[in-house]
Image (cartoon, rainbow, N blue to C red):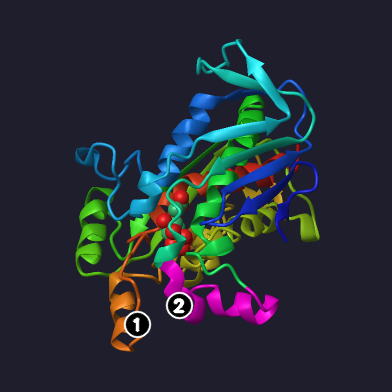
Amino acid sequence: MNSFGEKWTFTSFGESHGAAVGGVLDGVPAGLHISLDMIREELEKRAGRKPNLDPSLKGRETGVSPRALREPDEVEWLSGVIESDEVTKDQRTKGLVTLGTPIAFLIRNKDARPEDYEWLKHTYRVGHADKVYEQKYGIRDWRGGGRASARETAGRVVAGCLAKQQLEEKGITIHAELVQVGAEKDPALFAETIAAYQKDGDSIGGIVECRIDGLPVGTGGPIFDKLQAQLAFAVMSINACKGFAYGTGFEGVTEPGSVINHISGGIAGGISDGSEIVFRCVFKPTPTTPKALKKLNDQRVNVKMVNRSDACVAVRAVPVVEAMTALALVQFL
Ligand code: EPS
């Protein structure tokens, strides 16, 4: 399924080395002001061009895919919006305003180099979607990650920015950050931890924490509409995401009820209780690494040794977590 949401329906399209990635967003009300500055900022974070780990890197995040850094990620708006001179509430300047019609946009792939992936036509990478896609569909796009590449998340970030702006108008804000890299919990040491794995030709996982503020009491519903179920569905759809927990989470299992019963995580009975919502999600270490490619070559696979993967994809997942959270929440407005 390539579409998400019943009220705001976001359809994602595109392959990593095809012409473009992008989306169609239907159900967005007319008159919503969109800040292009905000979209640019979020896309820069997703590409790893706006470091939040080590400011000394001056514009380049540690362990980020070199291709993601090179892609300009220019958004072309095809329908559903017109330019607006009005300054948005948060003083971000240039903007667009929605027409209430389907919004279509695309981001052209500029640094696609399918020829580097010819070897993948006949090889399945461990830990990737390569083999199951071919088993299920009988065909796959072997050019890089194809449809399963994290490049696809660029479109989600654009759609998520619209959802975030709608939520902000209602006083609801979303903030995600990286809280753990491997076993390291000190943010000051994240950059050097990732760099050490990268230097070793390897990768490492990470945990992203997300906080939702200003959500009124009553969001979510009983049984299958539980707020945490909808958030988990949205967040677990992000590439490399392996787990979701809120409230007492997995850590809570070692504590007696008398100690942790008061922790709601902002949700009780699947319904928001008006307090801050906090959840965490975990991203696995990227499976394609220089080490993994070397191993394939040792098996005489004849791999062209080009590695465009991330040493810690959790870094770039932060704005995607915010985007998917926003898309999940607008369904309840
Ligand atoms: C990715 C692998 C690389 C990354 C890509 C994410 O792409 P590919 O092998 O398809 O060229 O560069 O990230 C981006 C290009 C991006 O914009 O996010 C993967 O397998 O997830």
Label 1 residue SS: helix
Q: Position of residue 244 (x, y in %)?
A: 55, 62
Magenta stretch holds residue 217: no
Magenta stretch, main secondary structure, is: helix
Q: Quadrant of ligand 1?
A: bottom left
Q: Quadrant of residue 166?
A: top right
In the rendered structure, which amino acid carries the disc numbered 1? Leu
* 137 to 13, vertically: above or below: below
Label pair 1/2, CB-CB below 8 angstroms = yes
Residue at coordinates 19% horizontally, 39% vertically from top-left?
A: 56
Label 2 residue SS: loop
Q: Residues within 10 Å of mark 2 (few under 14, many from 20)?
A: some
Q: Is residue 327 visible?
A: yes
Residue tagged 2: 125
Which segment is the magenta one?
A: 117-139
Horizontal side of 58 relative to 128 (left or right) equals: left
* 248 to 124, vertically: above or below: above
* 294 to 154, vertically: above or below: below
Residue tagged 1: 296
Quadrant that contains the N terminus: bottom right
